[in-house]
Amino acid sequence: MGSAIEDYLKTIYKLSLKHDRVMPKLVAERQGVTLAAVSKMVKRLVKQNLVRYDRSDGLQLSPPGRQVALEIIRHHRLIELYLHEALGYSWDRVDEEAERLEHVISEEFEDKIDKLLGYPTHDPHGAPIPTKDGRIENDRHPSLGSLAPGQSSVVRRVNDGDPEMLRYLAGCGLFPGEKVQVIAIEPYGGPIHLLVSGKEHFIGRELAENVFVEEFAEKA
């Protein structure tokens, strides 16, 4: 099928999780290409019955297109976890390596990684790993920035697109599974005061929007 097609399908799928309509302009911005290049690729994807396109509804993956997108995402996230857990890569370096490898591994290699890692459900950043038959967990959690002072939560996922941001989050201990309590929110757009696994940290509100959490009530 080719890595370019797979990348476009993966991009359309990810954009569909954040936008009601996925327009070609959004895809061009995410892919870092011209609108003309996207238009050319869309015609190809429509012809292959991988995508449906309507100017009012935007781009939508067909069932075969969605299956391909989830398979590539599965490859990517399994590779990330393998690099992190088996080879000792830090979580800010695995995305770039996985981008290169996701298109070339065989199904046998995918299965061996899956078995070696104990059939994991999430990657190092907390993102769900699609199953082999194309199912994926709904991981819609509120952002850390949406919590009020006094609320406690567990980090479930972080956005993984910026290695520098991941290094900063690591320094604050904001890994999936870590407990976080909002102590205070400074006024006038000031930072958020957090207690992360017993240690105090201050983070900006923009950064907090890249950390997704599950709220829980502290036991009395």
Image: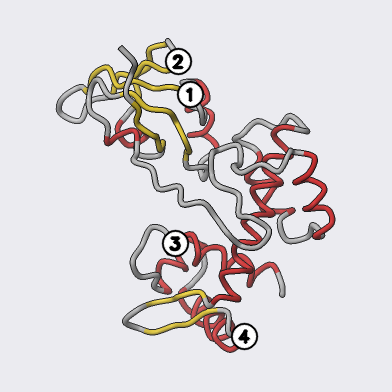
User: Residue drawn at (32%, 37%), measured in percent from left and top?
Assistant: 206
Residue 25 percent location from the top left of the image: 40, 71
Among numbered discs 3 and 1, the one appearing first in the sequence:
3
Q: Secondary structure at mark 4?
A: loop
Q: Amino acid at mark 3?
A: Leu
Disc 2 target residue? 197
Among numbered discs 3 and 2, the one appearing first in the sequence:
3
Q: Amino acid at mark 1?
A: Glu
Marks 2,1: beta carbons within 8 A = yes
Q: Which mark is residue 178?
A: 1
Residue 184 percent location from the top left of the image: 23, 19
Residue 37 percent location from the top left of the image: 53, 77
Q: Amino acid at mark 2?
A: Ser
Quarter location, residue 10:
bottom right
Quarter location, residue 119:
top right
Q: Which mark is residue 205?
A: none
Among numbered discs 2 and 4, the one appearing first in the sequence:
4
Among numbered discs 4 and 1, the one appearing first in the sequence:
4
Nearer to us of marks 3 and 2 is 2
User: Residue drawn at (34%, 20%), measured in percent from left and top?
Assistant: 181
Residue 39 percent location from the top left of the image: 49, 81
Marks 4,3: beta carbons within 8 A = no
